[in-house]
Amino acid sequence: MKIRLQKILSPTASRRKADAFVAEGRVTVNGVVAVPGTQVDPNVDVILLDGKPIQVATAHVYLMLHKPEGALTTADDPQGRPTIFDLLPEEMRPPLGRCFSVGRLDADSSGLLLVTTDGDWAYRITHPSFVCKKKYIARVQGVPSEDAMKAFRAGLDIDGKRTAPCEIELIKKERDARVCVTLHEGRNRQVRKMLLAIGHRVITLKRVEIGGVRLGALPKGQWRLLTTQEINQLG
């Protein structure tokens, strides 16, 4: 069943903005530049905005963002510091866009952050019972020993509570080593605190994967909509 292209674009932008996207030639359908009034079948046609796939047939927005260091995940900071929502189009920012971050990354960390308007989907990603694994790359002072990494994997006492078993792998052995950490919990600054507990202060920390969905080559400070496959994979 074919519907107006602007209706397909509406989860991504306002109706007026969607009309502008088409008028500016930024939307293609099956490789052909769309024109006002174009009719499409979202189940068959390949629809791209600025060369990137768009989400179709959904009332919600689902996107990934490469959070830079220094940006807060809060929607509003009384001190006027930069937030991740400054990186999004105005129509996606709270309160107009109703978007919120799925979980958090501390201000000093970078990497993959999910943003959505779908509370149920976000709950399935963040609640521990769903075991959504998150992968981080950390650069740390010194080189963790095998015994230290064994203790890390078994779980550590952090803030008076034992962490769940997790994974750690040494990926670059040098003066300041690089390690890959995978865990499913989301406690406050957990990766930093666990690495410090085994004697290695974090220098840089980047989240690269959530639930099998990877940050990939998305540039820092940029965002993209998730594909339907990624949305279903996560939630």
Image (tube, rainbow, N blue to C red):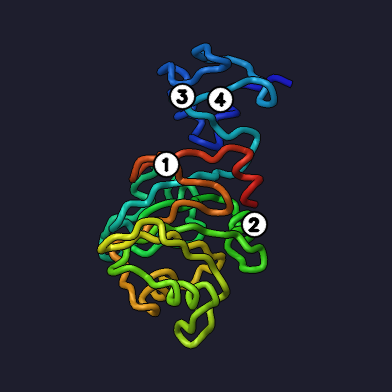
Q: What amino acid is at disc 3?
A: Gly
- The numbered dot on residue 120 is 2
Dot 3 crowding, Cα within 10 Å, few <14, some 14–19, many 20+: few
Labels 2 and 1 touching (C-beta < 8 A): no
- Residue 185 location, quadrant: bottom right
Label 4 and label 2: CA atoms lie apart by 26 Å
Residue 177 rendering spot, x and y as whole percentages: 32, 62
- Please state which of the two labelled residues, at mark 4 or mark 2, is closer to the viewer: 2
What is the distance, in whole Å, between disc 2 and disc 3 at their CAs?
30 Å
Q: Mark 3 highlights which residue?
A: 51
Left or right: where does residue 154 sit relative to residue 68? right
Kind of element beneath mark 4: helix
Classify mark 2: residues with Cα within 10 Å, few (<14), some (14-19) or many (20+): few
Three-letter amino acid code of the residue under disc 4: Gln
**Residue at x 56% of width, y 25% of height:** 6
Q: Secondary structure at mark 1?
A: strand
Residue at 25% in and 63% down: 175
Q: Position of residue 21 (x, y in %)?
A: 44, 24
Q: Quadrant of residue 5?
A: top right
Category of crowding for the residue at label 1, using alpha-carbon neighbours closer than 10 angstroms: few (below 14), some (14–19), many (at least 20):
many
Q: Which residue is mark 1?
A: 223
As helix, strand or loop, the secondary structure at mark 3 comes to: loop
